């Protein structure tokens, strides 16, 4: 074990690596989470530390909900992470390139939760996605690849580190979302005005609502709640696009609008 890690536990190591933008390799063998359940337990401890500098958890992200992203990352199942208040931007965002090791963006449908769901109050009928969505919006997830080799790092450790998440840009809430044909909503990613990818809502587990159902079940199965007014990013319909200083990125989703991000 490296000397600097000798007196640190896994949550301290991962939180310090995120705050310092340290390139992440494997955790010391005796600290590695060995399965996804252990990864989520470690994520909880990491995030309680990060809240001290990044603010409270206000939202969630689901990664690998589409075949596009599963192929891109080589991971066959969805994975969830948490998003902190101070990393959320609205409408148009501007971030410094030096604030990231390798900054990327993803094009996502986002939902706002209408009521708190706890393990005690959960039932599939009462808490299905149709009954817990307050509004929808377009979202651009900001990701940061801080990993030496995410393929060899392992899914449990990626989960513990919130699965690449580094923030987001959210659009305006759309309250009459029930009128939308969610499966056919087209998402588009542009960088410097050039279209780099498109994808439809049906790519998200066959339906964006299925991703939300998966997420809610996953949370309550781990004894955790989903809180009213929190948001959930349902997964990217376009493969991650990487940015450099000076880039202007935009993601747009039919009927939900668009958001932009400038990398200073």
Image: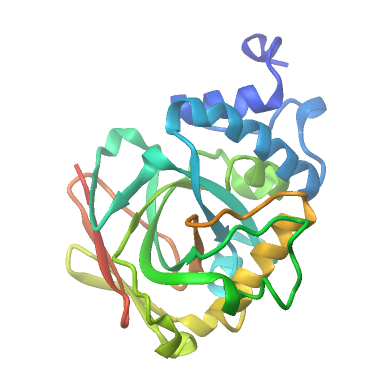
Quarter of the image for residue 128 reads bottom right
Quarter of the image for residue 41 reads top right
Q: Residue 130: x percent and y percent?
A: 58, 79
User: Is residue 142 shown above or below 45?
Assistant: below
Q: Residue 239: x percent and y percent?
A: 45, 67
Answer with left or right where residue 186 lies relative to residue 161. left
Which is more toward the observer, 149 or 66?
A: 66
Answer with left or right where residue 121 lies relative to residue 67. right
Which is more toward the observer, 215 or 199?
A: 215
Answer with left or right where residue 97 lies relative to residue 31. left
Q: Residue at x 69, y 29 (%)?
A: 27
Q: Residue at x 57, y 82 (%)?
A: 207
Q: Residue 90: x percent and y percent?
A: 28, 54
User: Is residue 64 shown above or below 57?
Assistant: below
**Number of numbered tags placed on the structure image:** 0
Q: Residue 106: x percent and y percent?
A: 41, 62
Query: Is residue 22 visible from the viewing direction of this image?
Result: no
Which is more toward the observer, 42 or 73?
A: 42
Q: How is the image coloured?
A: rainbow
Quarter the N terminus occupies:
top right
Q: Residue at x 66, y 9 (%)?
A: 3
Query: Is residue 167 visible from the viewing direction of this image?
Result: yes
Answer with left or right where residue 39 lies relative to residue 106. right
Q: Residue at x 33, y 34 (%)?
A: 99
User: Is residue 2 shown above or below 125?
Assistant: above
Quarter the C terminus occupies:
top left
């Amino acid at each position: 074990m490296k000397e600097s890690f000798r007196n640190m536990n896994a949550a301290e190591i991962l939180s310090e690596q995120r705050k310092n933008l340290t390139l992440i390799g494997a955790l010391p063998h005796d600290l590695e989470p060995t399965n996804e359940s252990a990864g989520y337990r470690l994520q909880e401890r990491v995030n309680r530390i990060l809240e001290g500098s990044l603010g409270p958890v206000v939202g969630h992200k689901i990664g690998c909900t589409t075949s596009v992203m599963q192929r891109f990352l080589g991971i066959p199942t969805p994975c969830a992470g948490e998003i902190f208040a101070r990393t959320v931007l609205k409408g148009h965002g501007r971030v410094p390139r030096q604030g990231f090791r390798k900054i990327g963006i993803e094009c996502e449908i986002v939902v706002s939760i209408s009521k708190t769901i706890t393990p005690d109050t959960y039932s599939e009928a009462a808490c299905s996605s149709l009954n817990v969505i307050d509004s929808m919006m377009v979202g651009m997830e900001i990701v940061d690849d801080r990993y030496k080799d995410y393929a060899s790092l392992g899914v449990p450790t990626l989960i513990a580190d919130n699965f690449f998440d580094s923030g987001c840009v959210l659009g305006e809430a759309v309250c009459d979302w029930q009128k939308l044909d969610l499966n056919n909503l087209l998402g588009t990613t542009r960088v410097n005005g050039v279209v780099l990818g498109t994808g439809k809502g049906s790519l998200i587990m066959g339906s964006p609502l299925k991703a939300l159902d998966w997420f809610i079940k996953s949370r309550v199965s781990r004894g955790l709640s989903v809180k009213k007014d929190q948001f959930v990013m349902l997964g990217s319909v376009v493969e991650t696009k990487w940015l450099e200083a000076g880039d202007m990125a935009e993601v747009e989703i039919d009927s939900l609008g668009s958001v932009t991000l400038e990398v200073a």
